[in-house]
Amino acid sequence: MEPSTPLDSSSNMDSFMFDSSSRRSTVSIHSRSSGVINSTREVSFGHSGSKPVRYGSKGAESEALSMSQKEISDEDARLVYVDDPDKTNDMLEFAGNSILTGKYSIFTFLPRNLFEQFHRVAYIYFLVIAILNQLPQLAVFGRGVSILPLAFVLLVTGVKDAFEDWRRHRSDKIENNRLGLILVNGQFLEKKWKHIRVGEVIKIRANETIPCDIVLLSTSDPTGVAYVQTLNLDGESNLKTRYAKQETQSKLPEKEKLDVLIKCEKPNRNIYGFQGNIEVDGKRLSLGSSNIVLRGCELKNTNWALGVAVYCGRDTKAMLNSSGAPSKRSLLETRMNSEIIMLSFFLVALCIVTSVCAAVWLKRHKDELNLMPYYRKLDVSEGKEESYKYYGWVLEIVFTFLMSVIVYQVMIPISLYISMELVRVGQAYFMIGDSRMYDKATESKFQCRALNINEDLGQIKYVFSDKTGTLTENKMEFQCASILGFDYSSATASLENEQVEYTVQADGTIFKPKMMVKVNQELLQLSKSGFTNDEGKQIYDFFLALAACNTIVPLVADTSDPMVKLIDYQGESPDEQALTFAAAAYGFMLIERTSGHIVIDIHGERQRFNVLGLHEFDSDRKRMSVILGYSDNSVKLFVKGADTSMLRLIDKSLNTDILHATKSHLHTYSSVGLRTLVIGTRDLDASEFEQWQSSFEVASTALMGRAALLRKVAINIENKLCILGATAIEDKLQQGVPESIESLRIAGIKVWVLTGDKQETAISIGYSSRLLTSNMIQIIINTNNRESCRRHLQDALVMSRQHMTTPGVTHNSEEGSDSVSTSFALIVDGTSLVYILDSELEEEFFQLASRCSVVLCCRVAPLQKAGIVALVKHRTDDMTLAIGDGANDVSMIQMADIGVGISGQEGRQAVMASDFAMGQFRFLVPLLLIHGHWNYQRLGYMITYNFYRNAIFVLVLFWYVLFTAFTLTTAINEWSSMLYSIIYTALPTIVVGILDKDLSKRTLLKHPQLYGAGLRNEAYNKKLFWLTMADTLWQSIAVFFVPLIAYWGTTIDVASIGDLWTLAVVILVNLHLAMDVIRWNWITHAAIWGSIIATFICVIVIDAIPVFPGYWAIFDVAGTALFWLCLLGIVIAALLPRLVVKYLYQYYFPSDIQISRETEKFGNPRDNGGGEIEMLPVSDAPP
Amino acid sequence: MSEEPSSTSVSVADGQSKSAKKPKYSRFSQQELDAWQPILTPSWAISIFTVIGLIFIPVGLTSLFASDSVMEVPFRYDDECLPPNSKNDPVAYIKDDTQNKTCNKKLTVKTKMTAPVYVYYQLDNFYQNHRRYVKSRDDRQLRRKGSDNDVSTCSPEDYTPKELGHNPIVPCGLIAWSMFNDTYKLSSKNKELAINKKNIAWKSDRDAKFGSDVYPKNFQVGGLIGGARLNESIPLSEQEDLIVWMRTAALPTFKKLYGKIETDIEDNEEIMLVIENNYNTYEFGARKSLVLSTTTWVGGRNHFLGMAYMLVGGISLVLAVGFLLMYVMHPRPLGDPSYLSWNKNPGILR
């Protein structure tokens, strides 16, 4: 089952760091439940970081051992009396099977929804401000007005939540009312799902969905096998095998009352692990994850299965796992938050200025306050002299301060958070909808699982990529076979696609393998010519090993032609599938597999072999073996495994020539990037077999440390093998991978490939994917102990430094490592990484790696992948992206700033843990270079713009306060000031944030270097922030002081000048945005001009309400020429400096983006003149 | 400026029928909408600044001329009208009801003022926009007959003092309470210059904001007297001085319309002023002036806007010329890839 590259995702195998679960769960002799399922996926989804991650390999082993020996203590256990739900539920009421995914009921909706919404800091801020405003002393705005923004946001979110919840309730209802067959008093009756209780026995028929987590008791298969599809649970479409215990398989619960007690762990969310034991007739047997079938799975290829419910309803693993994607915070947002702190300092400063001025004013006018008509502290209405609304100087100051916080509240752009969320949703919509990122082969769209890190895609500096399934297709193709020292390469023998369709006819039906394989004609002839001679026997054994030594399940499917049946080989390992298909093509067709025997059609002759034993793959041994009993009672052991582990076991005394030849073939294969496996065999004599059998029995029924015992048994038998040959499987590169990697490299992104493959394979893939080029200097670190590892690292560092200081390449230290002349490639293997990640060598490794343009890590274990990502992440501020497709990439994906999952051949764990998921590696190019770039540019601009937009408004309010005796009167109508960020200016920035694009897709793909804008933080940085703030200050001065001076000493009233200021600010702010819009489509036009019109309408409506003091002001003031002159003057004067700076900057200090925009529009002026500067040609990624 | 070339999509036709999952192709979803893509090229920048200059300078000039043609004659009288012996203690003087507050002054109008000549009173350093002040009114009470008791926001001028029956005041609040009550009589050559006080308030206020069936009640009857008294037999909608006063001024220096003189005032005409100096601004240092002014399309006499326009226009023209020179001397070919950062430094090839 294992290729020679077992650590990589191809085999889907847990690495040695993770074998705890597989050890724990390996079961009886029948168990073919490979460790596959319960492997790396220990990592609990949705809780990134909740699991303590260990990066080195130390410690993992001891942890694993302790876990394998763990027994369930009584407090931690759940006791299930089979077919006795009353007793089961007697003591403790276990959850029933009705599910409730809806969060709210009608009564709890309001409090709960509000409670959840107020988890956001922004809303708390809103709330505190609104509450402050309710105090009569502080009432700046009317009560209704002040809670308007908060109420608006709460309402929108509430309606959205209510709708979603209603849909959940509806689907809950459908789920709960589905029917299942439940054993009641000796007969199976139909019962609604929601009434199923723990302990009840459930009968499931073929193609039915399992209603709750059940432990299998018996199945229609005499050996107790059931096949399930876990598509709904984890998205894997291949069949998984589950087993009923032999002891319960024979029972008939309809007839006899069962006396079976199951003791299992408390409900948990690990869908790949289960621990428990079962007491049947006083015998205690252990249960593992291969005995449990989870809710949501479907029963396939099995007529019926009986099981006992152990976890119901909300306790089921499916329900426990239904949680959202992990939430991360983007770099841009983190940076933004520091500027928001800056803005809150501004806010406090403005408030302090206001209150200090007010304090001075009150002090100076202390004696006049009593009778001053506009203050009138004296209140005589009660007959005696009182102070009216005056609480003493100190309190007045405090109140002024708090009131100024209320008035200037929008300085902190809380609406920005909401706008950003909307923009990200819009961006996600476009990313999902991009037809460039739609994978036709798997029909998978791009998925945006995390919604708050879109813009990080534009700032990625490091890409960590898995190899198999990510760079390569993970569609294994059998390429070469070396048998007895002869190389039969299908590639050399058949140049043209000579795919032989091998078919078998039996009982009038033609069986045909689903996949066609290229075959070597010579070998085909040999395999057909019979197996009489010695050589023939070896070939026979070779193919028999390929067909038998695996965990593949053949599935027979109907075709349109009733006479033709299609055989599909289902299994977790694509390598095994490829080998089985190859065997079938050479005439060894696996027809049937049950737990006790297999049927292989050998050139038309059906032969039955007993499977006497099977040692599963584990990553310590890196091989698997199967013991076949022939019809003549002879017994043979077949072993298949990675060359490193296999070659040690080969009996060197036998045929050394073959061994040598095979070794050289293996080297040839792996150097062209093929995945190799070695196959060996041995005849077992009776005594040896019996000895093995007894120890195997003991081991497989052991309650403690069973996995370790089983492994020991396997190691004992797997030796002194006679070499049969080797296979080579090609893992084809995905379409467009070399081009993509080159694009990423040109974009300034460092690509690190982390693979479980051998060094030779990794390097050859590196070349074919253009990761490595011939002019790179390779630094290979491949050591066995810490000291030599350190020495190697230091030597390499010295060497790289020498190259760095070579004159001529040092102008630009930042980009120096990318220059061709000194380009390094670092190749590290897993053993060295153990030392590097475990010790203080990390720093040196990072130093070295950061000087290399390419880093290739081979033979890497999953947690090491995460360790490498963590190493880079903790040592730089640069953004990291991890991309992978398999379970072994999960930890890496969760560790990186952005995790991308490939929804490929290997199931869905990577996707489940990822932030973004897509079908092909090459989509990374449009994702980063196009969408990442756009998202970053858009949000970066949006943030500065929103800061500006709110600050200018606050400043205008502030200036006015200086002319109202510092009493926080707002000339701008309170409704207008609330609508400002809701209606007047909200939409354009959102629309621009979603739709504006600085450059076209084509340009961005043509010049990947443009991605550097994000790497250099061009769209959002401190300098830009301060420039914007300076501009804001000027603009606010223009807005405020032009009307102030123009109307000084005139009859202008508060409402009229307030309307002027309102309109001026809104028009200015929208024109400011319009000035920066790069592409105007009709939506942008509509949003910007529409907002201005909407503002006019709102101002008119507000002024048409007679109870407002400002009644009719706009009509009056807009009838004067002065008003319009002010408006025009303000807008032009305010925007003038910005326009000048923008022009000078764009024309005389053009950024790359600016030049490319010009090229896009005007063409390249050098095109005609035969430009001497060659644009680096980078082919567009395929659409 | 050009339309963006619509990019052709290769994978439109095929595959659409094959699977429903494939994202629907539309120019919107692929972000390929037709778009206008302006770039601030030198020609655009230069023309924008030229146009701004060419528009702003004439507009500035005309408005400067217009505001220059406005004749404004201000006359500050709060200090002038104090009797010499009260100069040191104006507050005592103004509070003393027994003192005669009438004040006769002479004013010479140098240039001719054509009718209508507006008569304003101007207050300096009077914060009609003070928070306590602007809120101290109730618009419902002013508007509707039955809303006398709507005085919640009017404190401390909401009810008459207890000894006077605790009745709601109409119009309530500090604004109405502090209404300006100086009066002017103007005469020239012994002939009275009639001041028309009709239609000095906004029509909208008279029609909709101040009720024609709401009459002043309990106004300035007890406690502190803030300013003018109102004739209780005239509905609020006709109390135009009150309406004008209640439109609170935006700035601490403001004018309010007192009335209109419908006859021309000749140049060097001497005008006799009879001012009833009742309003107490001495207490808090505000200044009072009487202003005679004509008006024009830019409002009153204020050169600021014209100057500002000239300035902005002038700067724009200078910038346009400057940009033109810079362009001629240091042109940069647009879209030249040799300016791209990765092409600038040929030593570093990526």
Image: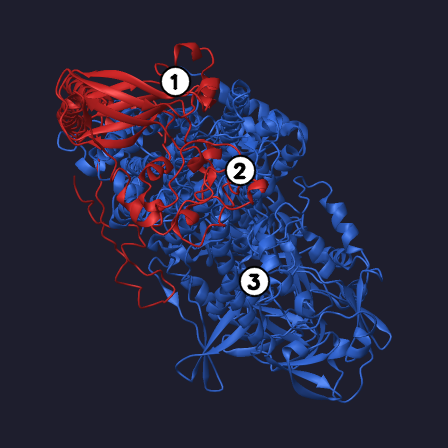
Chain colours: A blue, B red
Work out whether residue A674 can be spotted.
Answer: no
Identify which residue is drawn at 28% across, 48% down.
A1090
Please report, as a chain letter, where disc 1 is located: A
* Distance Cα–Cα, label 1 vs label 3: 51 Å
On residue A238, the disc is none
Same chain assignment for discs 2 and 3: no
Judge from the rendering whether residue A70 lies leftward or rightward of residue B25; answer left or right.
Answer: right
- Which residue does the numbered mark 2 point to in the structure image? B156
Q: Relative to B295, does residue A297 appear above or below in the rendering?
A: below
Q: Relative to A10, does residue A106 appear above or below in the rendering?
A: below
Please report, as a chain letter, where disc 3 is located: A
Q: A177 or A914: which is nearer to us?
A: A177
Where does residue A1176 sit, x and y in percent of width and height?
A: 28, 34
In terms of sequence position, does the residue under pointer 1 or pointer 3 come before the other?
3
Which image quadrant for residue A261? bottom right
Please report, as a chain letter, where disc 2 is located: B
Q: A435 or B163: which is nearer to us?
A: B163
> Helix, strand, or loop for circle 3?
helix
Same chain assignment for discs 1 and 2: no
- Residue type at mark 3 is Asp
- Which residue does the numbered mark 3 point to in the structure image? A234
Judge from the rendering whether residue A615 lies leftward or rightward of residue A700; answer left or right.
Answer: left
- Residue type at mark 1 is His
- Which residue does the numbered mark 1 point to in the structure image? A811
Q: Relative to A219, does residue A680 appear above or below in the rendering?
A: above
- Residue type at mark 2 is Pro
Q: Relative to A692, does residue A347 appear above or below in the rendering?
A: above
Where does residue B308 sit, x and y in percent of width and height?
A: 23, 22
> Helix, strand, or loop for circle 2?
loop
Where does residue A179 sit, x and y in percent of width and height?
A: 61, 82
